[in-house]
């Protein structure tokens, strides 16, 4: 019985952060430019609070300016929009991230679409979505970028591979499909209406699972030797009465068939913040009109 190589997202994220730190030092030395990232959190979602705190800490660690805007859950939509507008007009702030999910009374699309495309370090603005699909220089969503970096860490060249993306969200499924197409993969997007999804996945050399259903992808769906990137972060009850985090992939059984697999936690998750820092350095360089190490 073969056992898959485990793709260590923590280790690879640390390498990306080191590259960002080097790029930030270069921008400062050669152009007197210090990139800055503002993160906006509305409400008290416990997981979001941890993610935002980690973002701020890691932003400072790579040498960038960091601003945290924590607003109460009942903040009116107009106040959030006014804050985004203020950050759009602040030249020292090169990246703006509004943490999701937002409270229900706030229209997330309206808020995200107000962020200046050049400061949209999440890559969610329709202008960046369009730029990605037509192959122009864009700010690209962080989790998809991180997923492709992890796939390339074991496969090097993705050209010609059959890639199956499970999930069609705007945040992961669609952008990761665009990135894989750019890498010359043959890309299939499978979703809740896909017929015989097991057979579709069985044809994949590379599986990206981003569906949000705990352990949906089974070992019998996997082509022997395939690479699996598990984007899911699902909290489920554990035996000790608490909760634990599992991915969209049934890890133990898939690891017996796959060639390489990301764990959850410790796979794609850490790459999300590392790629956010990368995008922030890229945004600063783009706004200053100077060369960027990251596209
Ligand atoms: N504006 C955005 N909001 C959200 C995004 C995003 O990319 N932009 N993604 C997620 C949350 N997120 C970052 O914001 C994020 C999620 C998970 C991790 C991570 O490192 N996960 C760990 C496990 C953490 C845990 O124990 O809870 C792992 O997988 O190892 C980092 C960032 C939704 N909102």
Image (tube, helix red, strand yellow):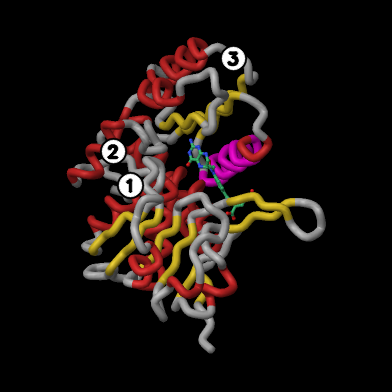
Residue at position x 36%, y 24% in the image: 113
Residue 290 x, y percent position in the rendering: 27, 39
Up/down of 221 relative to 36, above or below: below
On the image, the x and y values in percent for residue 231 come to 48, 55
**Which residue is at 25% across, 63% downward?**
185
Looking at the rendered image, the disc whose residue lies closer to the viewer, 1 or 2, is: 1
The 10 Å Cα crowd at callout 3, few under 14, some 14 to 19, many 20 or more, is some
Asked if residue 103 is positioned above or below residue 51 in the image, the reply reads above
Q: Which residues are magenta?
A: 49-62
x, y percentage for residue 108? Answer: 45, 25
Q: Residue at x 28, y 68 (%)?
A: 162
Q: Nearer the viewer, mark 1 or mark 3?
A: 1
* Real-space Cα separation, disc 1 to disc 3, in angstroms: 31 Å
- What is the distance, in whole Å, between disc 2 and disc 3 at their CAs? 28 Å
In space, the residues marked 1 and 2 are separated at their CA atoms by 9 Å
Q: Is residue 57 magenta?
A: yes
Which labelled disc corresponds to residue 174? Answer: 1
Residue 29 shows up from this direction: no
Which tag, 2 or 3, sits closer to the chain's start? 3
Does the magenta segment cover residue 292?
no
Q: Are marks 1 and 2 in contact (CB under 8 Å)?
A: yes
**Secondary structure mostly seen in the magenta stretch:** helix
Q: Pick out the residue farthest to the bottom.
A: 1
| Number of disc labels | 3
Q: Secondary structure at mark 2?
A: helix
Q: Which residue is mark 3?
A: 75
Residue that carries the numbered disc 2 in the rendered image: 129
């Amino acid at each position: 019985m073969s056992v898959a190589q485990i793709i260590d997202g923590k280790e690879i994220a640390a390498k990306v952060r080191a590259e960002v730190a080097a790029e930030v030092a270069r921008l400062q030395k050669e152009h007197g430019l210090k990139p800055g990232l503002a993160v906006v959190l509305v409400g008290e979602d416990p997981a979001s609070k941890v993610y935002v705190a980690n973002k701020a800490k890691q932003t400072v660690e790579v040498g960038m300016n960091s601003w945290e805007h924590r607003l109460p859950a009942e903040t009116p939509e107009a106040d959030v929009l006014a804050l985004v507008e203020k950050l759009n007009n602040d030249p020292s702030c090169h990246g703006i991230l509004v943490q999701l999910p937002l409270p229900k009374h706030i229209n997330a699309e309206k808020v995200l679409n107000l962020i200046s495309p050049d400061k949209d370090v999440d890559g969610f603005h329709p202008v960046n979505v369009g730029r990605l699909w037509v192959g122009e220089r864009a700010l690209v969503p962080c989790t998809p970028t991180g997923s492709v970096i992890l796939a390339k860490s074991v496969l090097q060249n993705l050209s010609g591979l059959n890639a199956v993306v499970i999930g069609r969200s705007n945040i992961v499924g669609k952008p990761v499909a665009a990135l894989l197409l750019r890498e010359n993969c043959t890309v299939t997007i499978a979703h809740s209406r896909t017929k015989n999804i097991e057979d579709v996945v069985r044809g994949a050399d590379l599986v990206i699972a981003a569906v949000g259903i705990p352990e949906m992808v089974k070992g019998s769906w996997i082509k022997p030797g395939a690479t699996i990137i598990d984007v899911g972060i699902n909290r489920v009850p554990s035996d000790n009465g608490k909760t634990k985090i599992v991915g969209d992939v049934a890890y133990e059984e898939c690891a017996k068939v796959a060639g390489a697999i990301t764990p959850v936690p410790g796979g794609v998750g850490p790459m999300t913040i590392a790629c956010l820092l990368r995008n922030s350095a890229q945004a600063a360089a783009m706004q200053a009109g100077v060369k960027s190490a990251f596209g």
